[in-house]
């Protein structure tokens, strides 16, 4: 009898493990999302079936006779022949399609335009076709073989990513201008008319509870203020200042069964907020929450939103925070109060439209709990702003101190010692004791104690959730610009990101975040190529895997 019970228990246990391994939603408490990659990384994340959407926009060109060393178009030079930098002078319709080209006698130097792509190694090669409407002369350039060309369609084989893919337009009939250009990999020929998203990208995104669209919204740099300035699904490109259409982001959330997280433009008007929220309500599946925050890191002096908040705060409260003697600190706390004020106004509008589906988020630097207190209490903005907020978010990255100036000699020695150096790096991440650090126990313990525990206490005090708007490893210089100049150090960190030990580090990190009281954590970032400014992504290519990605999926599934 005891044996039978044991066998039955084993069967039930196996069944439970199997159900967890095949689940697509998080176990209770294990909620995890990701940030999309930036617009400049669209060519490597490759989210769409129509890759024209991820091209860089219209590049203006002129003709130069290189053999005779003289311009064909007036004003053209060797230096400017490929790019005259007159993109802002290309006449386009409301969707961004070019309506005409200038003649040689006109003032602009350019006489032709190009749509080009950045070409990472994983760019989709093989058979493609171009379709378009209108009357124009258009050619495909790059490492390509054109197999057929008729009006309205070009078939070509992209042999490699050695040279940038380029569509070159040399004539446009203004009465029937070129428009609705699509560039489709042949493997998507049967689905592109009904499916916006690359199936491999969708397969990856469907594993997560939420998607933060801050990079796709171009939140850090956007000048978007009014609704009529926004991008729409009909826009020629999705990589301009207005960022991605809200409809496209909502569609991805729907198809991924994920809650969207929007980071609203810092210049957005109340009318923009309302119409954005109304569009989300009309398009988003009813069961999904909508996380919404005002801009991104309105405390970080790297971003225009912080300076804009300070300027507006000084107009509202010219004598505010005069007790703070340090000018920079005073300006920061003025910006925090303005952010609290504007976030409260934004929250009111989103909740009027979406009700309790709207989750209003404010965020600040995790290592400075005083910032959280200022946002919650907002003394200059009338006080008690926390009553309008649902969540406070931080970025509990781990490992950033390892590459600081004081640890640079140590890291360089690791970089010079091959695999042993990688092992030493992970010893520091997991257990500490090698690099100079404010908290014993290693990089993960550092992040939890410095950026999580203190903020859990604050969120409990004010009755809001603690979330992570970004998170994951941060093996990157933080003194000065986020860039690694030493190639050996770059290789050390890049290789560490692919190392199986990174999976162990992520497992420990995510469990520690959860135990400390953290809720949803949004990894930074999703899918992107690794370079000397960016090795944050969980994957370098859709449809692949990595140790950190596997650890994230196991965490979501409750393993």
Image: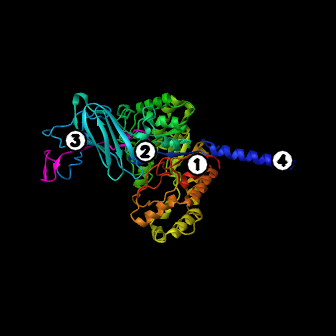
Q: Mark 3 or mark 2, which is nearer the start of the sequence?
A: 2
Query: Which x, y percent locates residue 75?
Result: 14, 47
Query: Which x, y percent locates residue 35?
Result: 48, 46
Q: Mark 1 or mark 4, which is nearer the start of the sequence?
A: 4
* Residue 166 in sight in this render: yes
Q: Which residue is mark 2?
A: 46
> Dot 4: within a 10 Å radius of its alpha carbon, few (fewer than 14), some, or many (20 or more) residues?
few
Q: Which residue is mark 1?
A: 553
Q: Nearer the viewer, residue 442 or 36?
A: 36
Where residue 142 is drawn, which disc sits there? none
- Label 1 sits on a secondary structure element that is helix
Q: CA distance from mark 1 to mark 3?
A: 48 Å
Q: Which residue is mark 3?
A: 112
Q: Mark 4 or mark 3, which is nearer the start of the sequence?
A: 4
Q: CA distance from mark 4 to mark 2?
A: 52 Å
The boundaries of the magenta stretch are 47-76
Q: Which residue is mark 4?
A: 4
- Label 3 sits on a secondary structure element that is strand
Q: Is residue 156 left or right of residue 45?
A: left
Mark 4 or mark 1, which is nearer to you? 4
Mark 4 or mark 2, which is nearer to you? 4
- Picture quarter containing residue 128? top left
Q: CA distance from mark 2 to mark 3?
A: 27 Å
Q: Mark 3 or mark 1, which is nearer the start of the sequence?
A: 3
Relative to 296, say whether 415 is above or below: below
> Dot 2: within a 10 Å radius of its alpha carbon, few (fewer than 14), some, or many (20 or more) residues?
many
> Dot 1: within a 10 Å radius of its alpha carbon, few (fewer than 14), some, or many (20 or more) residues?
many
Q: Which secondary structure is most common in the magenta stretch? A: loop
Q: CA distance from mark 4 to mark 1?
A: 34 Å
**Residue 27 falls within the magenta-colored stretch:** no
């Amino acid at each position: 009898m005891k044996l039978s019970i044991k066998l039955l228990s084993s069967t039930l246990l196996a069944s439970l493990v199997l159900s967890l391994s095949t689940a697509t939603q998080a176990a209770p408490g294990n909620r995890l999302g990701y940030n999309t990659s930036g617009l400049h990384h669209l060519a490597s994340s490759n989210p769409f079936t129509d890759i024209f959407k991820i091209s860089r926009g219209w590049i203006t060109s002129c003709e130069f006779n290189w053999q005779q060393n003289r311009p064909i178009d007036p004003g053209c030079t060797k230096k400017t022949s490929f790019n005259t930098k007159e993109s802002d002078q290309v006449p386009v319709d409301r969707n961004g399609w070019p309506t005409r080209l200038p003649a040689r006698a006109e003032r602009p130097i350019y006489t032709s335009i190009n749509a080009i792509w950045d070409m990472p190694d994983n760019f989709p090669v093989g058979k493609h076709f171009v379709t378009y409407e209108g009357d124009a002369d258009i050619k495909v350039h790059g490492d390509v073989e054109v197999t057929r060309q008729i009006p309205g369609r070009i078939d070509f084989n992209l042999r490699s990513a050695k040279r940038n893919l380029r569509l070159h337009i040399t004539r446009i009939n203004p009465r029937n201008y070129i428009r609705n250009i699509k560039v489709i990999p042949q493997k998507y020929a049967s689905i592109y008319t009904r499916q916006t998203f690359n199936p491999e990208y969708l397969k990856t995104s469907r594993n997560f509870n939420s998607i933060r669209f801050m990079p796709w919204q171009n939140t850090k740099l956007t000048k978007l203020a009014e609704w009529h300035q926004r991008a729409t699904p009909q826009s020629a490109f999705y990589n301009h200042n207005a960022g991605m259409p809200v409809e496209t982001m909502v569609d991805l959330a729907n198809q991924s069964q994920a809650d969207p997280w929007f980071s609203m433009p810092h210049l957005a008007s109340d009318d923009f907020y309302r119409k954005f929220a109304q569009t989300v309500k009309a398009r988003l599946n009813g069961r999904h929450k909508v996380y919404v925050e005002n801009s991104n890191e309105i405390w970080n002096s790297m971003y225009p939103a912080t300076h804009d908040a300070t300027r507006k705060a000084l107009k509202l409260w010219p004598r505010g925070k005069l007790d703070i003697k340090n000018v920079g600190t005073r300006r920061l706390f003025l910006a925090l109060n303005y952010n609290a004020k504007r976030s409260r106004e934004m929250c009111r509008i989103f909740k009027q439209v979406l009700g309790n589906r709207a989750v209003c988020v404010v965020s600040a630097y995790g290592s400075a709990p005083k910032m959280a207190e200022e946002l919650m209490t907002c003394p200059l903005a009338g006080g008690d702003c926390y009553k309008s907020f649902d969540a406070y978010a931080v970025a509990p990255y781990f490992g950033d101190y390892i590459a600081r100036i004081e640890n640079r000699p140590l890291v360089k020695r690791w970089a010079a010692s091959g695999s042993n150096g990688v092992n030493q790096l992970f010893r520091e991440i997991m257990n500490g004791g090698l690099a100079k650090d404010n908290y014993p126990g290693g990089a993960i313990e550092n992040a939890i104690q410095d950026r999580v525990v203190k903020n859990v206490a604050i969120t409990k005090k004010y009755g809001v959730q603690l979330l992570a708007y970004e998170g994951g490893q941060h093996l990157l210089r933080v003194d000065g610009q986020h860039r690694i100049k030493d190639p050996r150090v770059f290789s050390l960190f890049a290789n560490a990101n692919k190392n199986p030990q990174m999976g162990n580090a992520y497992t420990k990190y995510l469990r520690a975040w959860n135990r400390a009281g953290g809720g949803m954590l949004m990894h930074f970032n999703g899918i992107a190529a690794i370079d000397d400014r960016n090795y944050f992504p969980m994957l370098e290519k859709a449809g692949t895997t990595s140790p950190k990605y596997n650890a994230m999926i196991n965490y979501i599934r409750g393993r």
